[in-house]
Image: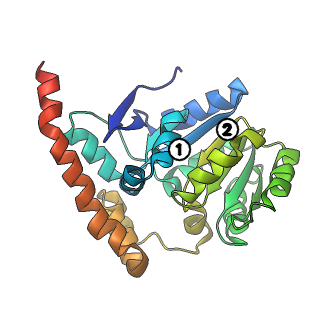
Amino acid sequence: MSAPPRIRVLDLPVDVVTRQGLLDRVAELVDAGGRATVAYLNVHVANVAFRDADLAGFLEGVDLCYCDGSGVRLGARLLGERLPERMTGADWIWDFAARAEGCWRVAWVGGEPGVARTAAAELEARCPALEIRAWHGFHSPAETPAVLAEINAWAPQVVLVGMGTPVQERWVARWRPDLDAPVVWCLGATADFVSGKTSRGPQVLYDNHMEWLARLLTEPRRLWRRYLVGNPWFFARVLARVPAQQRRRHR
């Protein structure tokens, strides 16, 4: 499998890939043995990147950037592009664990102390042969080199980094050269969901492509601005691009 085709949504890259294709591409990057980086694009990431040139530049340089939300998928459709599906970490993490079991060592960095460890234990409970270790995400810059040394001594093929945007992307941009793993993968708050620290909300909303509402219902005080202000702003910017996009297609 070669690198998937890449489209752009609001000048940001996103790869046209299914969930199975995502895992297949990660497997290829592991086998290649280089230093690849995987990230995702959702409405929140796109909104932050609009004002954060470093985040936009980071996304531009990653080896794989997949669609993490229905908002980006709809935005792509309005712009005349097609993304086959959206893949949040809480959805693909179980498939990933099954793929890694007996095959890859995994390191998970992020979350409050104990959260990533609990999430890793949940994956091990379902995939007993999975080799995974976890570190929390609240180390100071002075402490981080020692953490990286521990991770490198574990010699994982994949390092999962979940600290929220833009913290995790800045962390990976700063420390990726010091991580020996073939793949470093930003995955947001997945550990919070897998560990049970945070509820995902009603499954019916996810089934109907309304994960933003599910998240809002579970954490309204923290997330109201992200969704009630951020979502309309994202789509306003998308709709402003539609006429120019249509003219380009007609030419």
Task: Please tell me which residue lies in front, 177 or 212.
Answer: 177
* Residue 242 picture location, percent across and down: 15, 39
* Residue type highlighted by circle 2: Val
* Residue type highlighted by circle 1: Ala
Q: Which corner quadrant holds the C terminus?
A: top left
Q: Is residue 72 left or right of residue 185?
A: left
Question: Regarding mark 2 in the picture, which secondary structure is present there?
Answer: strand
The residue depicted at 21 percent of the width and 33 percent of the height is 80
The residue that mark 1 highlights is 39
**Mark identifier at residue 183:** 2
- Which image quadrant for residue 96? top right
**Mark identifier at residue 101:** none
Q: Is residue 194 left or right of residue 32?
A: left
* Residue 95 picture location, percent across and down: 57, 46
> Is disc 1 surrounded by few (<14), some (14 to 19) or many (20+) residues within 10 Å?
many
Farthest residue toward the bottom?
Answer: 221
Question: Regarding mark 1 in the picture, which secondary structure is present there?
Answer: strand
The residue depicted at 15 percent of the width and 33 percent of the height is 244
* Residue 76 picture location, percent across and down: 27, 40
The answer, for residue 204, to whether it is visible in the render is no
